[in-house]
Amino acid sequence: MSKETLSRRDFISGIAAGGAVATLASSAEAVESSDAVVFHSFPIVEPKPAGGRIKIVCAEKLAPEEADQIRSAGKNIDLVLLRDRSGLKDNAAEAEAILGVVDRETMLNARKLKWVQTWAAGVESLPQELMEHPCVLTNMQRVFAPVIAESALGLMLSLARGLAQISIPAFKERRWARSDVPLADLYQKTLGIVGLGGIGTETARRAHYGFSMKVLAVDPKPLPKPEFVAELREPGWLMEMVPQADVLMSAAPLTKETRHMFNESVFRNMKRSSYFINVSRGGLVDQEALARALKEGWIQGAGLDVTTPEPLPVELPEPGPHSAQFGERTYPPGPAHGSRRGKRPPLLARAASAERSGQGSRLLEA
């Protein structure tokens, strides 16, 4: 039994050579690291050799080079490229791997399924049948992380430098406006991150090395503390971290535990000069409390890449000193769709292990 991290390249190469899925045991194993806050939650079992063809069904558009990369992982791979997701359920019966977003009907028809690669970072909207299935589930969290991190920093900069409140509206109206918004900079400020997964880590890296920011973070997963993070604690430390942060950022998944975790208590404990950034899921935020925080000046501003629902029906304040900025969603399609986020990292690149929210098998965050 190997306790090494399982990459998607190793995984697909393993099933191509053998056909058996990697199974995930439930016992916890420690990571030997003096900086570890918590530990790896499970060991990985190597795929066992077996014969036969491996059917991989893809319901998402791939660039030709991406399709070639998948086929090159093994000589016995049959890659089926569908026009759209409507054909998934009819091809699910013999599929051992599915690349794309699956629905209930697809899971009910799947008899040999061992791996699902969903096409998003979040997994909270996936069907219960998948959550209870023993297959391996991987997401796009670390694939999307670099561009979402850049969006997060863009939101921070546009608020701190008055671009969202004054400069951009004035430019659209072709007028010269003197700013009455207090301008700030990110240099040597403190960034508090809730959720140090792929998105949180990439934001922390850029904030620290690019702006000399001090990074504090909370996360429930087994993570060693990166050298660019000053302090990493369990979620119970959140309310101690909040008043220290000049920018508080949400990068956590939406679960029963995290729904509305950014509430009145959190916003009231933030600095009046601070900003709130959300690049995860709108459901983590009590949006009425946020609207009140902006209107009454508890915080300086908010940059929202996500809301619930979208567009947000709650009337937020007009642009001004306590404005909210609504960013375009940073989960665009891949290169084959004409991506706005540049070239996607290799589809079968790297994967970091973490527990999947909900029941059933584990989630591998890619």
Image (cartoon, grey):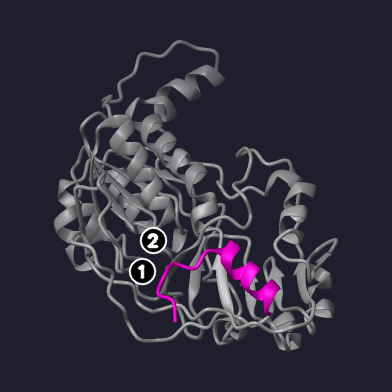
Which mark is in front, 2 or 1? 2
Q: Picture quarter containing residue 217?
A: bottom left
**Residue in the foreground of this view, choosing between 33 and 314:** 33
Disc on the earlier residue, 2 or 1 = 2
Question: Which residue has dot 1 on it?
Answer: 258
* Residue occupied by mark 2: 252
Q: Amino acid at mark 2?
A: Ala
Relative to residue 359, is residue 260 depicted above or below?
above
For residue 91, above or below residue 342:
below
Nearer-the-camera pick, 195 or 268: 195
Instruction: Work out which quarter of the rendered image holds the N terminus and state it.
Output: bottom left
- For label 2, the crowd category at 10 Å Cα-Cα, with few meaning under 14, some 14 to 19 and many 20 or more, is many
Distance Cα–Cα, label 2 vs label 1: 8 Å
Query: Do residues under tags 2 and 1 come within 8 Å of each other at their CB atoms?
Result: yes
Question: Which residue of the protein is positioned furthest toward the top in this rendering?
Answer: 176
The residue shown at (73%, 66%) is 74
Q: Is residue 3 left or right of residue 237?
A: right
State whether residue 284 is above or below residue 159.
below
Q: Can residue 167 be seen by looking at this rendering?
A: yes
- Residue at point 80%, 48% (across, down): 64
Q: Quadrant of residue 182?
A: top left
Please provide the residue range marked out in magenta: 1-18
Image coordinates for residue 136, horizontal then vertical, percent: 57, 77
User: Residue 323's x, y, as percent?
Assistant: 37, 37
Element assignment for label 1: loop
Mark 1: which amino acid?
Thr
Q: Is residue 9 left or right of residue 261?
A: right
> Residue 349's quadrant in the figure?
bottom right
Q: Position of residue 25 (x, y in %)?
A: 43, 86
**Residue 11 on the magenta segment:** yes
Q: Is residue 312 visible?
A: no
